[in-house]
Image (cartoon, helix red, strand yellow):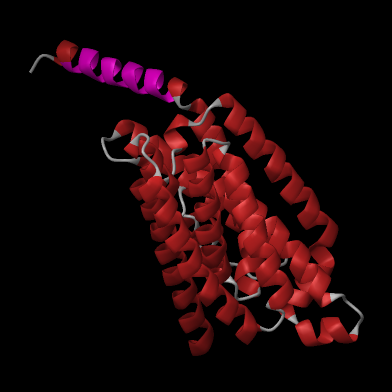
Amino acid sequence: MNWSDVGDALFGGVAQYGAILALVQNSVWAGAVLGIVGGLIGVFVIQRDMSFAVHGISELSFAGAAAALLLGVDVVTGSLIGSLLAAVLIGWLGARARDRNSIIGVLMPFGLGLGILFLSLYSGRSANRFSLLTGQIVSVQSGQLGVLIVLSAVVLVGLLLIWRPLRFDSLDPQSAAARGVPSRWVSLGFMLLLGLVVAVAVHIIGALLVMALLVTPAAAAMRVATGPLAVPVLAAVFGVVSAVGGILLAVAGTLPVSPYITTVSFVIYLVCRAIGARRDRVAVTE
């Protein structure tokens, strides 16, 4: 075996990987930003039992993006309109869990049907249609990254402003209402912030994969942490690892980025679930 040839091959592979990584650096930053914001807001999604709502909003966001694609206007704007419309409907009409689930159940097939209709009428590149479902995180442009960062900053500021009443209302809504917390307005504000995150996430990672960054990291964090600070921080870390790790693996492989992101996120959840289950068994035996 010629070790010199092996070294040259390894060096060439590393150099090629670095060159490709330099081309997708916007995607890496986009994944990191989405991971942080998705992990933080995902904690409240889990606490408020609204995982189903994320999917419902994503379907209307998908319909809005598909309509924008058909009309030849900005896809992000269409996605935002669809997301915010769904968020307002769910937040305002779905104050109670039973009503909320019914509204989401009605909106999901409606949004999906509209999106499919608009895509069937679209005569442009098929890649544009596919990207609405699975995202285009490996081709994030500087302008798209800027929009993502601005909207994410708005969401983070909004979360900080309503953090305490939102956390109180999420953990104990009856006591929060008794203490004068405006639950309907807090819920509506949270839904609008969630709508913004979903709209950006749909454009980057696709309507079908939103929950991989807005639900799974937070669900994993709650399996191994309980503190009011530890859970959101850990959820944000898991979100970043899932998104950025998936992109880095995709650069080295030949498959699309989406399976890598969802797989990394799912593996993290399985590991955290196993750790949490083992800790619970130890606590019972003691």
Camera-nearest residue between 164 and 11: 164
Camera-nearest residue between 234 and 5: 234
Residue 250 position, x and y percent, is 35, 37
Position of residue 269 relative to residue 237, above or below, is: below
Position of residue 46 relative to residue 283, above or below, is: above
Residue 5 position, x and y percent, is 16, 12
Q: Residue at x 65, y 35 (%)?
A: 147
Q: Specify whether residue 229 is in view.
A: no
Picture mark count: 0
Q: Is residue 268 left or right of residue 68?
A: left
- Which segment is the magenta one? 6-21
Instruction: In the displayed orientation, state which residue is furthest to the left.
Output: 1
Q: Residue at x 78, y 76 (%)?
A: 169
Q: Residue at x 25, y 20 (%)?
A: 10
Position of residue 108 relative to residue 120, above or below, is: below
Which SS type dominates the magenta stretch? helix
Name the quadrant of the N terminus: top left
Residue 253 position, x and y percent, is 28, 35
Residue 128 position, x and y percent, is 40, 38
Camera-nearest residue between 95 and 7: 95
Q: Residue at x 77, y 56 (%)?
A: 159
